[in-house]
Image: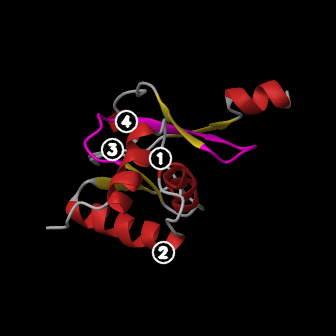
Amino acid sequence: MERKTRQREAILGALEQSIGPLSPSEILESSQEQLPGIGIATIYRNVKSFVDEGKVDAVKIPGEPDRYEISGKPHHHHFICKRCNRVFEARGCPGQFDSMAPVGFHVDGHEVFLYGRCETCLKGHP
């Protein structure tokens, strides 16, 4: 069992306060607000530990490095801003996909990614 440290608390705090999954550099930036001396190696080491412990999930976006979010969230999807590359949680789910699978196949799960521009990017650059 890992001991509680200021670094771990800062990293978990960054992930808990986020509106979407974060990249390691985004976790670093957010964690530095609480703990200015924290470094990227500490982020990687602790995020790996959190994933191993089941506290954090890796979000695998095709063609991108993994991002991370707190485990245990209800089923959801993600919106990726094509301008700033930030990722946000998307509300809802389009439903079951069994009808899209080949005949005789069974769908065990799915991932849906929405792409576009976030509200901030739309305000700055329509």
Q: Position of residue 62 (x, y in %)?
A: 55, 58
Nearer-the-camera pick, 105 or 27:
27
Q: Is residue 45 above or below residue 51?
A: below
Disc nearer the start of the sequence (2/3): 2
In-front residue for pair 117/11: 11
Q: Is residue 71 magenta?
A: yes
Marks 2,4: beta carbons within 8 A: no
Over which residues does the magenta segment extend?
A: 70-86
Q: Amino acid at mark 2?
A: Ala
Is residue 92 shown left or right of residue 1? right
Q: CA distance from mark 2 to mark 3?
A: 48 Å
Reply above or below: 2 against 106: below
Residue situated in front as seen by the camera: 37 or 97: 37
Q: On the rendered image, what quadrant is the C terminus found in?
A: top right
Relative to residue 122, is residue 110 drawn left or right?
A: left
Image position of 86 (left or right of 35): right
Residue assigned mark 4: 97
Q: Which of the two labelled residues, at mark 3 and mark 4, occupies the earlier sequence position? A: 4
Q: Secondary structure at mark 4?
A: loop
- Residue in view at x 52 percent, y 69 percent: 39
Q: Which residue is mark 1?
A: 21
Which residue is denoted by mark 3 in the rendering? 103
Dominant SS in magenta: loop
- Residue projecting furthest to the right: 125
Q: Nearer the viewer, mark 4 or mark 1?
A: 1
Callout count: 4
